[in-house]
Amino acid sequence: MNREVDGRHTAYRAVIAGTGSYAPAKLLTNDDLSKMVETSDEWITTRTGIKQRHITNDDETTATLAIEAAKIALDDAGIQGKDIDMIILATITPEMVFPSTASFVQKELKAKHAWVFDLAAACSGFIYGMAVAQQFIESGRYKNCLLIGAETLSKITNYKDRTSCILFGDGAGAVVLKRTEDGERGVIYSTMRADGNSWEALNCQAYGSKYPAWKELDDPSKIYMEIHGREVYQQAVRKIVTTITMCLKKCGLTLDDVKMVVSHQMNARIIESAAKRLKLPGDKIFVNIHEYGNTSAASVPIAFDDCRKQGKIKKGDIVILVAFGAGLTWGANVIQL
Ligand SMILES: CC(C)(COP(=O)(O)OP(=O)(O)OC[C@H]1O[C@@H](n2cnc3c(N)ncnc32)[C@H](O)[C@@H]1OP(=O)(O)O)[C@@H](O)C(=O)NCCC(=O)NCCS
């Protein structure tokens, strides 16, 4: 019999069958940024934990990164493009206005049976996407879902604004979710929340229907990301703590049962502060922000893949993925590997 969660049993579970990640080769270090804006390696490292970010060149796009990560995840899962029923691609830096970035991935992977779409929930996009894939698999409708988080945030970063340009990088991460009847394993529980009242805390306003490309902008910096860092910082800590606490309660688990928390990598201090409030030991929280910076929707799947490939989590372990970001949006997935 399957584990009961939230008063619910399901015949099928969505199990993680493969993971992959990919980041562009080009690096942007703290020292590089110190030559572009008034900042220092010391300031960035102590305030954020970030040492470098991977940055796309002109030929690399969100789709090219997504395709590379997806190929690795498919290989890892031992399936091919033709086996995929659905592709969800979480991003806030799509290939173009339309079609969806997922369409380009489908074409390249020859995933001819898959229906595909992009999901825009910023840093929480991968968590939201996993919940969507989970529903389609648990209902029995699909066998294999490809979920990708991919971003080229460097393309909407203002490299004259030192409060934001130090934070962001590019990359992609992917997982294959497979239908299983093995009751204990798979996505156990997902929670997703949002608060549109605070949309201004993190935004990039042009170009969409409010500020179309043909209209002159009142403020040219609207083409870049704008962040209200201090406000976001406090909210992020609080939401991570309450979300994980709620997940444990809903699943009848304690922190002792959890092998690893893989958080969205927004700032090492935010992650550490949340872990401290939760009384989560340091070896149960995965951090790789020093290498990638904040890659929004790609952050959780890149960290999850890194953590798995470093052998820190293995089959049978319980892992919590958690994220917070623009929208505002936040959420978590509890998974037994
Ligand atoms: C952005 C962030 C790193 C700033 O760190 P902080 O400790 O809150 O720093 P503050 O904003 O309070 O700024 C402290 C000082 O450093 C200065 N400063 C800001 N950026 C700087 C930089 N890159 N280099 C040097 N000094 C900088 C500020 O101007 C301020 O100076 P002042 O005290 O003279 O006014 C942090 O708030 C953060 O990570 N927030 C969340 C980020 C986010 O929104 N991520 C995306 C969504 S998940």
Image: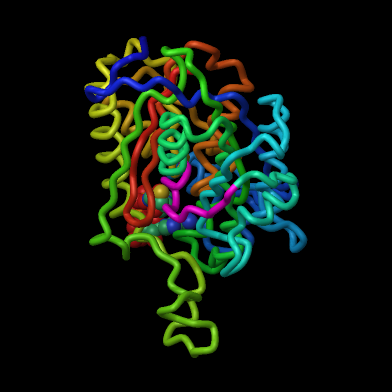
**As drawn, is 169 to the left or to the right of 189?**
right
Q: Residue at x 27, y 33 (%)?
A: 241
Magenta stretch: give its range.
Answer: 115-126
Locate the N terminus and report the quarter of the image it occupies. top left
Please check the rendered image and state whether residue 120 is part of the magenta-colored stretch, yes or no: yes
The answer, for residue 268, to whether it is visible in the render is no
For residue 264, above or below residue 325: above
The answer, for residue 207, to whether it is visible in the render is yes
**As drawn, is 2 to the left or to the right of 23?**
left
For residue 121, above or below residue 225: above
Q: Residue at x 32, y 65 (%)?
A: 200
Locate residue 268, reporting x and y percent: 44, 37
Locate residue 145, reporting x and y percent: 56, 36
Q: Quadrant of ligand 1?
A: bottom left
**As drawn, is 173 to the left or to the right of 76?**
left
Q: Residue at x 47, y 38 (%)?
A: 133
Q: Quadrant of residue 335?
A: top left
Locate residue 254, reporting x and y percent: 28, 14
For residue 227, above or below residue 270: below
Given residues 57 and 209, the one toward you in this image is 209
Q: Residue at x 51, y 49 (%)?
A: 90
Locate residue 212, reporting x and y percent: 49, 82
Please check the rendered image and state whether residue 124 is part of the magenta-colored stretch, yes or no: yes
The number of callouts visible is: 0
For residue 236, above or below residue 151: above
